[in-house]
Image (tube, helix red, strand yellow):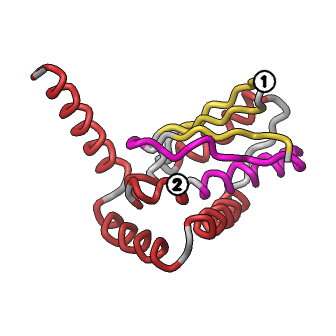
Amino acid sequence: MQHAFSQASTASLDAAHAQRLQCQRQWRGFLSALGQEFAEALPAQELTVLMARIGMRFAAQHPLAASDTLPGLQQAMNAVWDALDWGVVELSQSSAGMEIRHRFSPLVAAFGEAAGGWAVGFLQGAYQQWFDAAGASGLKVQAAGAPDALGSVQLRLVTA
């Protein structure tokens, strides 16, 4: 029993440590307060849409290097994320569509776990903009869940 407790405690400490590394100290209080205000002012669905618009604007301001292959597109996306310490993305095909696995985004560290459901809209919007610019208009990026404690989230590009 004690072994299971220590593993759970270690995992919790590891997640807390990772979150401190993902969001710089000077931004934590501000972004936490901003997220709380967002959550009090707007319903979660409207916040998701707002964050998607912010993500689309971000992606338009950070256009990808041209690529005509999936590995090249993934590499271009990771070049943007890496330059900003925003984690990594893995793209893969599945029967359900294109799988987008974004790992280690600072969204949970910045806004808190309670905001994960709407904060992921930022990634939806960014990937939507990038896929549209790559010629995949008519397809839609959807979240397959909220980010975990380390900011990792599964998204999917599907037929609109």
The answer to whether the residues at label 1 and label 2 have Cβ atoms under 8 Å apart is no
At horizontal 29% and vertical 50% (from top left) the residue drawn is 20
Q: What residue would you read off at disc 2? A: 117
Task: Bin the neighbour count of mark 2 within 10 Å (Cα to Cα): few under 14, some 14-19, many 20 and up.
Answer: some
Instruction: State the quadrant of the N terminus.
Output: top left
Magenta stretch: includes residue 31: no
| Helix, strand or loop at mark 1 | loop
Whichever of labels 1 and 2 marks the residue nearer the N terminus, that label is 1
Q: Which residues are magenta?
A: 121-150
Does 41 appear above or below 140?
below
How far is the residue under mark 1 from the one under mark 2?
25 Å
At horizontal 76% and vertical 54% (from top left) the residue drawn is 129
Q: What residue would you read off at disc 1? A: 95
| Helix, strand or loop at mark 2 | helix
Q: Is residue 62 left or right of residue 108?
A: right
Residue 144 place in picture, x, y as percent: 62, 41
Q: Quadrant of residue 6?
A: top left
At horizontal 16% and vertical 28% (from top left) the residue drawn is 5
Q: Nearer the viewer, residue 26 or 153?
A: 153
Does 2 appear above or below 113?
above
Total marks shown come to 2
The amino acid pointed to by label 1 is: Ser
Residue 38 place in picture, x, y as percent: 49, 74
Task: Bin the neighbour count of mark 1 within 10 Å (Cα to Cα): few under 14, some 14-19, many 20 and up.
Answer: few
The amino acid pointed to by label 2 is: Gly
Residue 69 place in picture, x, y as percent: 81, 29
Q: Is residue 99 left or right of residue 1?
A: right
Tag shown at residue 145 = none
Q: Is residue 44 left or right of residue 125?
A: left
